[in-house]
Image: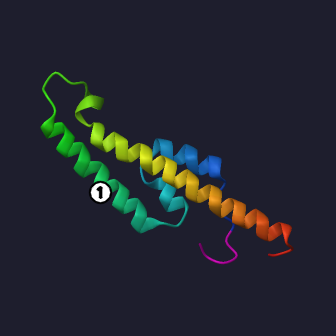
Amino acid sequence: MAEGRVPPRPRWVLAVAMVLPGMGQVLNGQNSRAMTFIFFMLVLAWVSAHLSTGGQSFIGRHAGGFFVYALSVLDAYRHARIAWTEYAWTLAKGGP
């Protein structure tokens, strides 16, 4: 994170990450991490779609992608929470 930049609120990052895949990482300033998550979401969704049986639901056919999507939401929230806590700690100590 850039010095002097106020980090986004963790709940805002969580809400955005739940709606738009990878955007939580973008809000946290982790663009390459967002692209990595999106890449693996697409790849694992494709792999699980081609390995599943025909009678599965949409979510069942793309379970690999949804799994990575869930991990990306948790990851974005975790990094936002850490950044916010560090920012609050800095303010409490009399920092910028």
Q: Is residue 24 above or below residue 7?
A: above
* Magenta stretch holds residue 49: no
Residue tagged 1: 39
- Say which element carries label 1: helix
> Which of the image's four quarters has the N terminus?
bottom right
Q: Position of residue 92 (x, y in %)?
A: 85, 67
Report whether 73 appears left or right of 1.
left
Q: Main secondary structure of the magenta part?
A: loop
Crowding at label 1, few (<14), some or many (≥20) Cα neighbours within 10 Å? some
Q: Position of residue 79 (x, y in %)?
A: 57, 59
Q: Position of residue 31 (x, y in %)?
A: 44, 66
Residue at left offset 25%, top offset 43%: 45
Residue at left offset 36%, top offset 42%: 67
Which residue occupies the foreground of this view, 51 or 41?
51
Which image quadrant for residue 38?
bottom left
Outermost residue to the top = 55
Report whether 95 appears left or right of 67.
right
Residue numbers of the magenta segment: 1-5
Q: Is residue 55 above or below residue 24?
A: above
